[in-house]
Amino acid sequence: MTLISIDGVSRRFGEVTALDSVGLDIRQGEFFALLGPSGCGKTTLLRILAGFEQPDAGSVRLDGADLLAIPAHRRPVNLMFQSYALFPHMSVEKNVAYGLERERLPRAEIRERVGAVLETVGLAAQARRRPHELSGGQRQRVALARAIVKRPRLLLLDEPLSALDKKVRSEMQLELKRLQHEVGITFVVVTHDQEEAMSLADRIAVMNGGRVEQVDAPVDLYERPRTPFVAGFIGANNLFTGRVTGKGLEVDGLGVLPAPAGSEEGGTAMLAVRPERIRLGPVTDGEGVLRGRVVDVSFYGGVSHLALSVPGHDRAVLAATQGRARVEAGAEVAVSWDAADAALVDGVSGDRRA
């Protein structure tokens, strides 16, 4: 069931178009991510949902009702700030209770709700501590507890894990996902961190230049990008631009490369091949579709990343393999992949070269 329906939302700041006719549906109870580079419009959209910005055009509806007509302080929406914005002079439980006290709820109800949410986020033992006595991950949990204790229909998170180091961030990604399922609130997170979006979200909207490029589940975004921007933005990719033929994609200087069927023959398209789909072998007659030379080998925690120089291609071809690489820098190799393991993306102008 759709909770938030965004239709034709546009927002300009002088000569800058932050949002250009954005349309999205966010479902009840899902973890939804707005992902894109700086300046793509994702934070502006978040601020419109929160009530801090008004669009120049378009509509936003929550359960069919006009959300834009409701003042920010009356919306069933809460925003968790990037900085956490905790009151330093208040204890954990006072920080969490603040919003409920402002609503003048009965003290017994406040105590009950604060105690329950601190148990949920694992901070019951730290209830009397001040923010400066907590770790970064614990402060993040306090901010989250303060946001969900008011039981909003929609929780907005603006780069929620950016202040944490890598190890704590990985732990909190799992914690956020667990909490979202437990409390049943719809979460919308804004991030430029692909790993964060891919690990947290049920669905992701990839934004670029104020527009939504693609909305899909993380696996579908990764394996089946539908626009050139998504193919180049989501994860590492080997991109080749050429002409679609019955046998594959014909690329100047490289010949015909294995590509899945589906695009109109004679049209220009982009072929995307993930590094882990690349196979390397010995240079022998009939092996591989390309020939390359290994220029770099790097080892990252169980996976080896290789960069190869391929004559006729103006950028390195990337390959990834589990464990230690079986080839060294300087080796000549045959490069191949299966057509079914690649993605063919339409909508590429004829003069663009990947």
Image: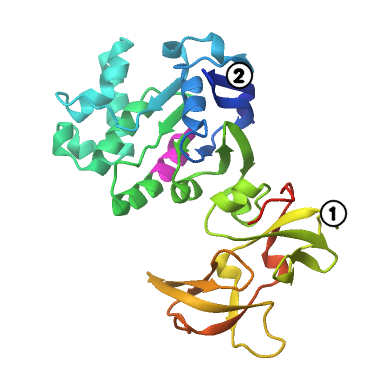
Which of the two labelled residues, at mark 1 and mark 2, occupies the earlier sequence position?
2
- The residue beneath circle 2 is 61
Mark 1, secondary structure of its residue: loop
Q: Amino acid at mark 2?
A: Arg
Residue 305 showing in the rendered view: yes
User: Residue 198 in the image: x percent, y percent?
Assistant: 50, 49
Q: Quadrant of the N terminus?
A: top right
Q: Amino acid at mark 1?
A: Glu
User: Residue 118 in the image: x percent, y percent?
Assistant: 28, 34
Compared to residue 3, the image places residue 322 above or below, namely below
Q: Quadrant of the C terminus?
A: bottom right
Residue at 46% x, 29% y: name it: 43
Indicate the colouring scheme: rainbow
- Magenta-tinted stretch: 176-188
- The residue beneath circle 1 is 264
Please tell me how crowded label 1 is: few (under 14), some (14-19), or many (20+) other residues with Cα within 10 Å: few
Q: Is residue 169 left or right of residue 126?
A: right
- Quarter of the image where one finds residue 178: top left
User: Residue 223 in the image: x percent, y percent?
Assistant: 63, 57
Camera-nearest residue between 203 and 186: 203
Compared to residue 158, the image places residue 111 above or below, namely above
User: Residue 280 in the image: x percent, y percent?
Assistant: 58, 80
- In front: mark 1 or mark 2? 1
